[in-house]
Each structure stands twice: as structure tokens, then as C-alpha cells.
Image: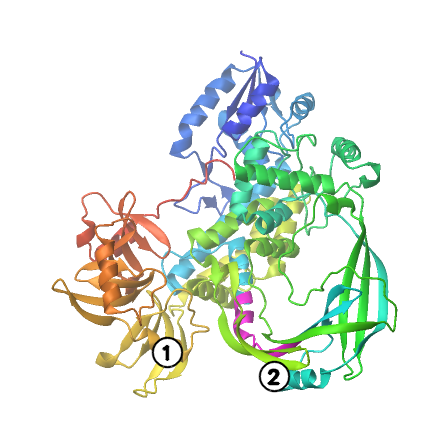
Amino acid sequence: MEGNLVIVESPAKAATIQKFLGEGFTVKSSFGHIRDLQDSKLSVDVQNGFKPEYIIPSDKKKVVSELKKAAAKADTVWLASDEDREGEAISWHLSEVLGLDKSRTKRIVFHEITKEAILNAVRNPREIDLNLVDAQQARRVLDRLVGFELSPVLWRKIRRGLSAGRVQSVALRLIVDREKEIIGFKSTPYYKVEGVFESQGVKLKGVLDRKFSSLEQAREFLEQSIGASYKVADIERKDAVRHPAPPFTTSTLQQEASRKLRLSVSATMRLAQGLYERGLITYMRTDSTNLSSLALGTSKEFIVNNFGAEYSHPRQFHTKAKGAQEAHEAIRPTYISNTDIDGTPQEKKLYNLIWKRTVASQMEDARMLNTTVKLSSDKREECFTIQAAQVLFDGFLKLYLEGSDETAEDEGNDAILPQIAIGDSFNCLSINADGKFTQPPYRYSEATLVKKLEELGIGRPSTYAPTITTLTTSRGYVAKGDFEGRSESVENLTLKNGKISSRTKTESIGSEKGKLLPQEIGIIVSDYLVENFPKIMDYDFTANVEKDFDSIAEGEKVWNSVISEFYTPFHGKVEATLEDKQYSRKERLLGVDPADGLEVYAKYGQFGSYVTKGEGGNKVSASLAKGQLIENITLEQALSLFQLPRQLGEMDGQALSIHKGRYGAYIKLGDRNISLPKGYDPLTVSTEQVHQIVSESGEKAQKEIINEFKQSDIAIINGRYGPYIKHAGQNYKIPKGKDAVSLSEQDCLDIIAQGAPTGRSSRFGKKK
């Protein structure tokens, strides 16, 4: 026997722990899960208590072999995977696969990788908690059953290659439902009036307590305000207290990192895991806002020494998240004294965010004096309201202020007021009446989607990042990007020095950046599942399943009984749906083309979204452009799509034209396709400009479209590492011996049907 073997999930974690344990301990990594359900089959024995059929994948056999040898030589094996359910399951799988003897196997847990925490864990080992293992197993099996049985339904009813998931599909529904709210929103114009006033040399902005519905009403108000006198009609002063935000949980870290650092949820978790494995922060998957007594003490010491005793306010927060389950700490620095770290700029920024949030949570409340002043006019009954805020004691604001998801248009204007009393006069310097439009609801960003999922009790901290990745990257149901909205011209008015002037301005309606935009296929999948599998798509049902998992973890329910209760009616519904041979079709009548009297439809077919008119030999079709949806495309937009392809004569003896493909507009010169650069309108770009673009493209092959079959949503791309096929947001390898240039549409369909998309990371790899 050769001492102690400690097994953790990742090499980085192993290296950090090895430094603390020293001689007598060997720390090795399992590189995440060493076994899981098979990819290619259900891998669940439905007839025998839903027993999972686990396998060791080929890329893990070498790791397992090495761990078996090391375990056989060790006096004691310490299973040190993470403290949550997933980590407990990893330890259980290791125990089962390695055939570990219970008498010399110990389970240890810690929520920070520090010497004190590791040594304390070694002093206090425990056995594997099979209730936690069963809870993880229940989630894994239920998700496999839902995904494996629903996906063929979508293949049969909509299109091959689609998938559904218990959490994934509900998150998709949230995004789709919000988009439908926006589509159904009727924006109305109004005029917002603001005045600039002066008192004792101080300029202050006031907002009129009424909005006008038309330019005429706004003009009438300004005309009647010429020469008006303004006095203080009312002053309201209120003391206010602002409390610091709690330390970070997984979801609040994801939200704040998105708001302040512009990090995606997956990037935040990747960086946080790196910080944790280096021993710089506590465990990054947690629902808890609790801080240890040590953290409370060191935070107080730091605050008193650096800000003063009056800034210290030790406090313990209680978790409010629906269905919170983890008992360990909030995400915090392992050592409060470490105000900075070595690392990449992103690692430094994320650490700094965590450090500030932790310390600020232990600082005194900020005390404010909020003042509201109402100015009345001797010409009109409306009043202007001036908002002012004075910080009496900055408290935690000296260090940190939590971000907000969206900024409301009519937020108050903070200002420092001079000494004033009721009846005092104010000079009016100018009044602006600006045309605005009511704005539709905000689309979800990654941060606000995580917030909503947490509010509804859907999923858990570890599921948010992979759920968003599945929707955006793996399935293409959702795209992350900007929405241009629409622009409207408005006439704004200004009253200054007794005269009214006007100016024209363009106002944007519904413009957003960095939001989650549902794609047509995502809307179709969500609508189909809501209609045919309403229970799966029900928010409360999905949240209640999480409660069942919690009950299993606490030993109150038997995991396979919970699965059985769900599966029997679900499976019956799946079978009945598959027996129905009717396909899911979607179409919308947009109107009549005034040029020929033909009805114009927007439809979704086997190869994507398109607009069409006419029948037989007179039928004309065109693919929808990027960002266009069947739900909101207008007749005018549809008619413009019919203008492509646009013939531009010849160049170098070959036919030259502009086409609209699934991936945007492109130029076709003979058999060659060249993407039309951004900034060029395919309907108005001149022949001379197209000639120049073609000439400048030269022999550039990077990301160039070799060929495209737009009806099949297929493009053959010459990428960095050679040609590949792109279909429905996925990439497929072209088999050796196949000439990319000569591939037909059917050749591509055969390759897609027989192969698997590239770029997917193994589910057995490093735990994310």
C-alpha cells in the first residue's frame, strides 16, 4: 500500500489540493464523470425500475484504468469531488467502477480550496450520500426520457435533427412568449415635456406631470406657457435607506457579470470555475447567500481598517430563491485580504466583482435624503416635478452599487437643490416637448432569462449555462444579437426666450442590443410542444419536478417512483402523437400583391421559412431574410424578397446576379458565390460596386460559400480547416474522398443523415 489517493474532477483542482496535502497524498483527476448513459440509445431500463444503463466511454477508459491501479495501491481512497449532487454522483460512480472497499474509502467535501478547508475535510470524512446520488440520477434519467422520446416526435412532425428537453423547452417558451408579446404590442405616440429651471444660480430639470398624445396638444401647452411664472407649490422630503445586495449566488453572479462585464453565462461559469480551482473563491455553484463566521470576521476587519468603524455592519443574509437547495456558502473570495489576483483581464474583473460584492454586503447602509419639488405655473394647471437626492452617508456605496437589467425611460433626475421654500420663484430657461413612443416589453438577455428561471424555480444553478448554450449554439432555436426595431420621424418642439421652434428627429422603437431572439424553428417547436405536450411546457410543473428532486435528496421520496408517476402518462401521449401521421404546418396570409392580384403567404416548410405566391409554373418563392419571422413579416417586406435574384448582366463572360440565401445576400458569378458585405443593400447596390466587390474578393477562401442549396438550408463552406457542410446551425464533416465542389444537394443530405454534427464537447468531459 502506498499512502493516500485523493480523486477530484479536474487537473487544476488536483494541482491546487496537492500543494496543501503534500507528502503522503497523491491527488489525481477523474476529468469529470467517468461513466454516463449511452449517447446512441435510451440507456434506461424502463421495465425494471428505470435502471440507468451506464457505460464507460472510450475516451475515459485510460483514465479509469490508471485510477484503478492507483486505488489498488493506496491505503485510503479519498473521494473529493464537488459538494453538490453532481459531485456526489461522480464519487458514487468512482466507487462503483473502481470497486472501492468501503472500509478504506472516505468521502470528503469542502466549498473552498484552501489549506484550512482541505485539512478540515480530511479530519471530518463521511460516506457517500446515496440520497443526493438518487436525486442526480432522477434528474439525469428524467431528462433522458423527455429528450429521447420527444425528439422523434419533433423529427416526425416538424423536421429531422430537432430536440426537446425538460428545462430547455420551458426556457424556450419563455423567450417565444415574450416575442409574441412584443409582436402583439401596439406602440402609441406621446409627447414628454421637460423644462430647465434656475434658482439661485443652480440649473434643475423638471418633468411635466402629464404626457400629451399629439403634437397639437404639446404645441398648445407651449403656446400657453409663453411668459409663464413658476413657483414652488410643494416640497416633500423623505429620509431613505439603501441596503447592500447579498453576496453572490450562482444566478446573481451570472446576472451581474452580464450587466457589468458583458460576459455570457457560460463564460462567467468557466472563469468562476477556474478561480475556484485555483483556490481564489468558494464553490461557484450555490443557491446560498450565507457567509462563514471567518468570512464575516475578516470582512469586518478589512472594512474597519480601510474605511473606518462607522462603515462596518456585519450581517447574515437568508436565501430567498425558490427551491434553494445548497447548504454551503455564497460565492466569495477565500481570503478577503486578497484585493487583487494574478490572471487574465477577465479573471481579474470577475474576481474584483466578487470581492466588492462580498465586502459591500458587510458595510453600513447608505442614508439618503430624497426631495420632490413641484413647480406650478400661473398659465396652466400642470406641474413640473424636480427630483433630487442627497447622500447623507455613502456606506456601502463607497465601494459597490448593484447593476440593473433595464433602464426605464422616466427615471427621476437626481440633483442637488439650493435652499428653497414653498412660494419661491424659479426662472424657466427652456421647455422641450419631445415625441416618444411607448416601448414594447424588453426581450430576455442571458441575465434576465436566468433571473426569470430562478424566480419560477425552473432548473438549478448548474443548468442555466448549458440550457442557454443548447438553445443558442447547439440547436439554433434562439440567436443572441441585436434587434434594430423600427424608426419613426417625429417633430420636437422647444420654447425658449418666448419663441417656439421645431426640429425633426428620428425616434427608435423596440431597438435592443445583446438579447435572445427566437428563430422561426424555435417558435414552431415551442408552439407545437405547448399545444401537444402542455404538461411538459407548464412552468409550475417544471418547478414542481425540481421540488421532487429536492425531496429525493432529503430522503423523503423514492427516485424511480417519482419517474414512474411522470413517465406512464407521458409515454402514452408520445405514442398517440406518433400514431397521428399529420405533419405540423405553419402558414400566414400576408395579403395580395397589387401588381398581379396574387395572394402572398409566409410559410414554414421542410427547408425553412419562405414567402410564396402563385401556383404551378407561376409559383414564386423566396427565403425569409435573417431576423424575419412568419409572425411579423409584412406584405411590403415579403414583396421586396421577390425582387431577388437580381440579374446584373455579365462579368468576365459569366452571368452576374445577386441572390438572397439563408446566411444573407450573396453575389453569384457563374458557379462562384461571394457574400455581399455588410452595408450594401442587395436591392440597390450598383453594378459597378458589385464588380469591385467581386474583384477585391480575389482568391480569399476563408469562410467563403462554395455552394448553397437554400431550400434545404445547406451551405458548403470553405473554412479554416477545409470545406464542411453547414445545416440548421450545425456543421458536418465532409467524408474523405468527397470533392466539396462537386457535392450535390442529395449528397449533402445523405452526409447529414449519416453523420453527427461536429464541435460538440463530450458530456463525459470536465464538469461545467
SS for dot 2: helix
Residue bounds of the magenta highlight: 178-192
Q: Which dot, 1 or 2, sits closer to the camera?
A: 2
Q: Is residue 101 rendered magenta in the image? A: no
Question: Which of the pair 298/436 is nearer the observer?
Answer: 436
Q: Position of residue 528 (x, y in %)?
A: 47, 66
Please, what is the three-letter code of the amino acid marked with disc 1? Tyr
Tell whether 42 sits left or right of 500. left
Element type at mark 1: strand
Residue 224 image-quadrant placement: bottom right
Circle number at residue 601: 1
Q: Are marks 1 and 2 in contact (CB under 8 Å)?
A: no
Q: Residue at x 28, y 72 (%)?
A: 644
Q: Is residue 181 magenta?
A: yes
Q: Whole-percent x and y of residue 77?
A: 57, 21
Q: Residues within 10 Å of mark 2 (few under 14, many from 20)?
A: some
The location of residue 423, given as percent across then percent down, is 87, 73
User: Against 611, is 534 above or below?
Assistant: above
**Whole-number angstrom distance, CA of label 1 to CA of label 2:** 37 Å
Is residue 104 at all visible to an observer of this figure?
no
Residue visible at 18% across and 49% down? Answer: 739
The residue drawn where x is 79% and y is 72% is 426
Decide if residue 697 is in sight here: yes
- Nearer to me, 250 or 637: 637
Furthest residue to the left? Answer: 653
State which tag comes first along the sequence, 1 or 2. Answer: 2
Vertical order, 636 against 418 (above or below): below
Would you say 683 lies left or right of 483 here? left
The residue closer to the viewer here, 146 or 306, is 306
The residue that disc 2 covers is: 215
Identify residue type, mark 2.
Answer: Leu
The image quarter containing residue 715 is: bottom left
